Amino acid sequence: MSDISASVGDFHFLSDDKLSRFDVNAIATDSLIGYMVECDLEYPTHLHDLHNTYPLVPEHPCIDKDMFSDTHRFMLAATECQNLISTKVISNLCNKSHCVTHYRCL
């Protein structure tokens, strides 16, 4: 992906007509025009074992107690530490919504 040039200007949204005809697979690999895409991504279960050690599309969620592992819960209880609400960059195998990415990453 080192052949992707940095965009420097002339940004605009596609018209409804162009958007309805947009096909990411039809864009030439050497196109001088690039696209940023907002999309929803489904992570198919048949890829979970293959991607388990390094899942694609990291996200930056606010971590709440429902997301803690059993080990984390045990450590908090054992050390009597208080949990601080925080955000973390995490990789997981969950579906994503409203992801913004360069079209070549799809």
Image (spheres, rainbow, N blue to C red):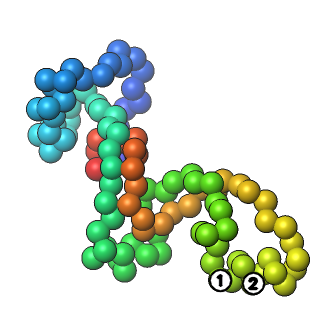
- Could you say whether the residue bearing mark 1 is in a helix, strand or loop? helix
State the image coordinates of residue 23 (x, y, percent, origin top left): 14, 39
* Residue farthest along the right direction in this orientation: 80
Residue 7 versus residue 67: which sits nearer the camera? 67
Residue 41 versus residue 3: which sits nearer the camera? 41
State the image coordinates of residue 5 (x, y, percent, origin top left): 37, 32
Residue at 71%, 78% (x, y): give it: 72
Residue 55 falls left or right of residue 24? right
- Could you say whether the residue bearing mark 2 is in a helix, strand or loop? helix
Disc 2 crowd rating (10 Å Cα; few below 14, some 14-19, many 20+) is few
Numbered mark located on residue 74 in the image: 2
Quadrant in which residue 12 is drawn: top left
Task: State whether residue 2 appears in this view.
Answer: no
Residue carrying label 1: 70
State the image coordinates of residue 10 (x, y, percent, origin top left): 35, 15
- Where 53 falls versus 104 (above or below)? below
Residue 101 versus residue 64: which sits nearer the camera? 64
State the image coordinates of residue 56 (x, y, percent, origin top left): 41, 61
- Where 48 falls versus 40 (above or below)? below
Residue at 31%, 60% (x, y): give it: 42
Task: State whether residue 73 appears in this view.
Answer: yes
Q: CA distance from mark 2 to mark 1?
A: 6 Å
Residue 29 falls left or right of residue 88? left
- Where 4 falls versus 60 (above or below)? above
- Under mark 1, the amino acid is Asp
Residue at 35%, 39% (x, y): give it: 38
Check contact, mark 2 vs mark 1: CB within 8 A.
yes
* Residue farthest along the front direction in this orientation: 66
Residue at 42%, 68% (x, y): give it: 93
Quadrant in which residue 65 is drawn: bottom right
- Under mark 2, the amino acid is Phe
